[in-house]
Image (cartoon, rainbow, N blue to C red):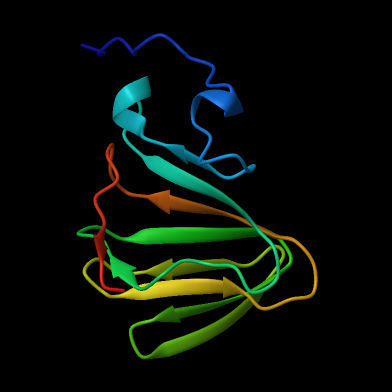
Amino acid sequence: MVESLAAPTLVEPDRIRLGGGPSRRFEGADHGAGVSYFYIDNRPGQGSKLHWHPYPETWVVLEGDVTFIVGDARIAATSGDTVTGPAFVPHKFANTGTGTMRLIGIHASAVIIQTDLE
């Protein structure tokens, strides 16, 4: 027997916006999805603080240059690159380019669970 799927939904950016800028936080549990994500739009020098999650995270760089610190690794990534971080490993990132940096941070969880370290 095939389980029926939940109805499809459209989530407009203004419903999940972070602050007054273009960045967004999507929590799958609020929309019938099993994954969550951050859409990040940062200027040069902006980024996240050191933190970890109890599940893996995958980042897809949509535009610009970004440096990730994942555990002891320093990873320079650019538009089109995908970077992964394992569960429970502290990580952060920063726009290290001269223009806008956009990325999607995919959380392998229907809710975002984050422990900040900074």
Residue 68 drawn above or below residue 30:
below
Quadrant of the frame with the N terminus? top left
Q: Residue at x 33, y 24 (%)?
A: 30
Q: In screen coordinates, is 20 left or right of 37?
A: right
Point out residue 2 in the picture as x, y percentages from the top left corner: 26, 13
Q: Nearer the viewer, residue 90 or 56?
A: 90
Q: In screen coordinates, is 104 left or right of 45?
A: left
Residue 32 appears in which quarter of the rendering?
A: top left
Residue 24 drawn above or below residue 92:
above
Q: In screen coordinates, is 50 left or right of 102?
A: left
Residue 44 drawn above or below residue 37:
below
Q: Residue at x 37, y 70 (%)?
A: 85
Q: In screen coordinates, is 18 left or right of 51?
A: right
Residue 95 appears in which quarter of the rendering?
A: bottom right
Q: Residue furthest right?
A: 99
Point out residue 87 in the picture as x, y percentages from the top left corner: 24, 66
Residue 46 appears in which quarter of the rendering?
A: bottom right
How many tags in the picture?
A: 0
Q: Residue at x 44, y 81 (%)?
A: 69
Quadrant of the frame with the C terminus? bottom left
Point out residue 110 in the picture as x, y percentages from the top left corner: 28, 37
Q: Residue at x 74, y 66 (%)?
A: 64
Q: Nearer the viewer, residue 4 or 14?
A: 14
Point out residue 5 in the picture as x, y percentages from the top left corner: 34, 13
